[in-house]
Amino acid sequence: MFELYRDCYRAPPLVRVVEPEALAEIPWVANTPYADLGFALDERTGRLIVVSAPDNLVKGAAGQAIQNMNLMFGLREETGLACLRRQA
């Protein structure tokens, strides 16, 4: 399942899939334009649990507006958001 998610989100520059057996956590995305995805299988029910962790301030409406404007003007999606990144 990890490979499927990783392959699906390989191209989007601001979405990261965390390693298997780890769940996405807010501290890893705080003050960044990233949204992290993690998942786990509940063996008891057979359900896949998907956890997403966006930083709501940067990945919220203002960050999305910048991202969309970049796409409209043919710029890289993360242009103008890079200064907000820090190592997670």
Image (tube, rainbow, N blue to C red):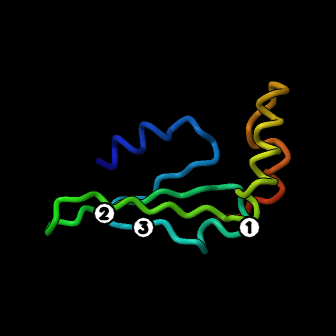
Q: CA distance from mark 3 to mark 1?
A: 18 Å
Q: Secondary structure at mark 3?
A: loop
Read off the residue under disc 3. Answer: 23
Q: CA distance from mark 3 to mark 2?
A: 7 Å
Q: Quadrant of residue 30?
A: bottom right
* Rendered residue at 16%/65% (across/down): 45
Q: Is residue 52 left or right of residue 30?
A: left
Residue type beneath disc 3: Leu
Percent x, y of residue 44: 14, 69
Percent x, y of residue 62: 81, 54
Percent x, y of residue 28: 59, 69
**Quarter occupied by the C terminus:** bottom right
Q: Residue furthest bottom?
A: 27
Say if mark 3 contacts mark 2, CB within 8 Å. Answer: yes
- Disc 2: CA contacts within 10 A as few (<14), some (14-19) or many (>=20): some
Read off the residue under disc 2. Answer: 40
Q: Secondary structure at mark 1?
A: loop
Q: Quadrant of residue 79?
A: top right
Instruction: Name which of mark 1 and mark 2 comes first in the sequence.
Output: 1
Say if mark 3 contacts mark 1, CB within 8 Å. Answer: no
Instruction: Name which of mark 3 and mark 2 comes first in the sequence.
Output: 3
Read off the residue under disc 1. Answer: 31
- Disc 3: CA contacts within 10 A as few (<14), some (14-19) or many (>=20): some
Numbered mark located on residue 3 in the image: none
* Rendered residue at 23%/59% (across/down): 47
Q: Quadrant of residue 38?
A: bottom left
